[in-house]
Amino acid sequence: MRISDREKLQLARMKAILKRAYQKVPYYKKRFDAAGVRPSDIRRLEDIKNLPFTTKTDLREGYPFGLFAVPRREIVEVHTSSGTTGKPTVSGYTRRDIELWGEVVARALTMCGATKESVIQNGYGYGLFTGGLGVHYGAQRIGATVIPISAGQTKRHLDIMQDFGSTILTCTPSYALYLTEAAEEAGINVKKLKLKAGCFGAEMWTDRMREEIEKRFHLIALNIYGLTEIIGPGVAQECEQKNGLHIFEDHFYPEVVAPETLEPLPDGEKGELVLTTLTRDGMPMIRFRTRDITTLRREPCKCGRTLVRMDRITGRTDDMLKIRGVLIFPYQIEKALLEIKGVEPHYQIIVTRPRHLDEIEVQVETSKKIFSDEIRHLEEIRKKIEKHIETAIGLRVKVTLVEPRTLPRSEGKAKRVIDKRQL
Amino acid sequence: MEVKQISVFLENKKGRLWEALHALAGARINVRALSIADTSEFGILRLIVPEPQIAKKVLAQGGFTVRENDVIAVGVPDKPGGLSSVLKILTDADINVEYLYAFVEKSGKKAVVVLRTDSISKGKKALKKAGATVLSSRQVYSL
């Protein structure tokens, strides 16, 4: 699609959804009126910056159905967010929304190579979490064979993977990594598996994790992005170029704003992602603050798609840790950690304040690669990790080596930070 | 054949040492000698067993980080100055000892010193040259 055509389509859809939100959802009317703007004031796409933001807090205030734009009987399905950061938020889908959802996830899976011939082993949790059913609808839309195995039951995952000849694995990246470990332990010959691609998301991960999963499972691992408030998975998907995620901007209009001032930032600058749904029926989201930190890039992608790309999520504004006054993201620690050879990507960050001073402890699992029979060598590697993290974040941390597989492996979102400070 | 030592990473947590030894007991592996090196947060359990390969497998299956490496075993007379005579040889040959542990043989006549030097081959050579009793793996495992 030509860019001018796409912008025309976006603008028409934006105008329509703003009008509908204003008319049908009292919350939006109140907010727009308070800000002194009307949907008709939006004449160009950029004008959206004059509209107020919608936050998770707003959604919680409208809990459960306050932001629906249709009568409840039109809603055919509801999902809620995981509630990682507090009370869950609700998302309501009309029949058309479910179709839209299937369509965008089908696009995402297609970008991972899925066809009618594919056997998709869906390891996202089925239930209120959007991951399971989102991928399910997408797979059905394509006409692939979907195995609704859900998260957990590792042995069953491995058995089915071998017996059914699964070609695409969909789950969280940390669970994928866990599966690779379990497969190794069970002595499974991974070369005999039929896996070709993995569609991994629902949590932050790194290129190092990608390399590990790809190497151990002999597949191509691609990043999928989405959030319950907007629709679930299928907001954006990485193509085989592995160079950022294409946002399906004909349905989801992206902006990036500065986290502190909330001023819109130009493409290429890092900030908080803000999304507006252009086609959601049941629950239009206008300028929803995702809290996810990313950068939008408009340079053409080698894959030929003209859709804007977003960098992989490198942090969340509500994950920001303020340690001794310094803002840091767990991602920075993870990245530093993974740059050291032999260190496994399993870690946990523990923040304490023993004597009015914040301290960070990073627990890292030992691996065969870094273990030695000499205390001296283990101390050396420990200090090396400490030094490396200190260089990356500018703060001293204490690194503790722990036994392998003692840090929690999540089947949903990995809990990386334990903040024990009592403020 | 070189004498093999099995090392195990242990977090300083209640019961971990027991779990490691319990795993070995379950595989009917008799520990010939052991030592524990510890820091405030973790320790390294070092073991000499007759079946190092099986021990390694059993421990790895039990979720432990395990490593196998060569060590030197030297027989010394069980009397004052026994160990010091061995160390003198290494000092004179300018060889560093990373760690060592010793145990007394059942008969009580001889003590066995397990040594880890920077270079195992150099350490062994120096000891043999000076006439120390370097034990073979077979001799050590059957102690």
Image (tube, helix red, strand yellow):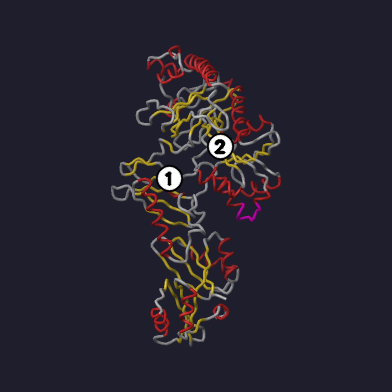
**Disc 1: which chain?**
A
Magenta-colored span: A183-189
Residue at x 55% of width, y 41% of height: A172
**Picture residue at 49% right of the left edge, 65% below the top:** B17
Give the foreground label among 1 and 2.
2
Q: Residues within 10 Å of mark 1 (few under 14, many from 20)?
A: some
Q: Earlier in the sequence, mark 1 or mark 2?
A: 2
Residue highlighted by disc 1: A417
Q: Specify few, some or many for label 2: CA neighbours under 10 Å numbering under 14, 14-19, or 20 or more.
A: few
Say if the magenta span includes residue A186.
Answer: yes
Question: Is A204 placed above or below B121 here?
Answer: above
What chain letter is assigned to the residue under label 2?
Answer: A
For label 2, the residue is A241
Camera-nearest residue between A357 and A208: A208
- Residue B83's place in the image compared with A400, above or below, is below
- Tag 2, which secondary structure? loop
Q: Residue at x 55, y 48 (%)?
A: A212
Q: Residue flagged by tag 2: what amino acid is it?
A: Gln
Q: Quadrant of residue A127?
A: top right
Q: Is residue B25 left or right of residue A37?
A: right
As for residue B34 lying within the magenta part, the answer is no
Across and down, in percent, residue A10 comes to: 52, 19
Q: Residue A399: horizontal and vertical position, in percent?
A: 40, 54
Q: Amino acid at mark 1?
A: Val
